[in-house]
Image: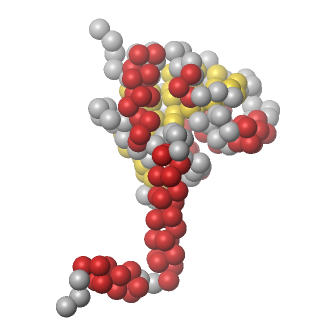
């Protein structure tokens, strides 16, 4: 009879062509992300869908003058949306990739107050005054970032992890677009 591998292969081949292509692309992306994580990178180079960014921006508890930090800001899309949804927010983006940082600068031209972009490691970011922190990191980096946020963030700061849960934290809300989720947390009040 057919072994389990043969059945799986037959099922894959029976899928419509578009589904096979999407499945192959997803497998390739997972392999690529795994390879990048093994190489010491802590974040995927995978922009968040605009629909998810907008949905998360709507629920963040921000007001003019509040500080929002994007750890690994990429092309700046989170900062652009936060500036649109919450005018007057003080925005900080941290990114190590010079090309992405240039794209973020271009995307943020004309935003007032001007967003501060930092070419530095996200683990060196100043999150002490942040009312909201957003990031999209590999699971391998989550424990280290969780410890940093618990030690340095102000009490009751909103934290959004795109793609992966923060270990040991309970999400207060989960937003989804397609198969990508954003886990929303609050830093616990300190005694």
Residue 13 lies left or right of residue 99; in this view the side is: left
Taking 163 as reference, is 58 above or below it?
above
Residue 3, position as x, y percentages in the image: 23, 83
Q: Residue furthest bottom?
A: 1
Q: Residue furthest top?
A: 191
Viewer-side residue, 136 vs 124? 124
Residue 136, position as x, y percentages in the image: 50, 41
Taking 180 as reference, is 19 above or below it?
below
Q: Residue furthest left?
A: 1
Image quadrant in which the C terminus is located: top left
Viewer-side residue, 143 vs 3? 3
Residue 46 lies left or right of residue 9; in this view the side is: right
Residue 12, position as x, y percentages in the image: 38, 80
Q: Quadrant of residue 76?
A: top right
| Picture residue at 57% right of the left edge, 22% below the top | 125
Residue 21, position as x, y percentages in the image: 51, 75
| Picture residue at 53% right of the left edge, 25% below the top | 123
| Picture residue at 42% right of the left edge, 28% below the top | 144
**Can the viewer see residue 48?**
no
**Can the viewer see residue 96?**
yes
Image quadrant in which the N terminus is located: bottom left
């Amino acid at each position: 009879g057919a072994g389990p591998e043969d059945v799986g292969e037959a099922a894959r081949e029976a899928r419509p062509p578009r589904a096979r292509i999407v499945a192959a692309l997803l497998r390739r992306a997972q392999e690529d992300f795994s390879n990048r994580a093994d190489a010491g990178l802590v974040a995927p180079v995978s922009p968040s869908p605009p629909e998810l960014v907008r949905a998360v921006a709507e629920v963040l508890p921000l007001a003019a003058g509040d500080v929002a930090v994007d750890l690994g800001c990429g092309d700046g899309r989170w900062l652009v949306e936060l500036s649109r949804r919450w005018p007057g927010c003080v925005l900080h983006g941290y990114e190590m990739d010079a090309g992405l940082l240039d794209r973020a600068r271009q995307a943020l031209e004309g935003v007032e107050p001007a967003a501060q972009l930092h070419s530095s490691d996200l683990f060196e970011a100043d999150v002490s005054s942040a009312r909201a922190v957003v990031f999209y990191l590999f699971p391998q980096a989550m424990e280290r970032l969780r410890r940093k946020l618990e030690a340095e963030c102000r009490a009751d700061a909103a934290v959004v992890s795109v793609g992966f849960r923060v270990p040991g934290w309970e999400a207060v809300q989960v937003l989804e677009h397609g198969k990508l989720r954003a886990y929303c947390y609050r830093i616990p009040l300190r005694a």
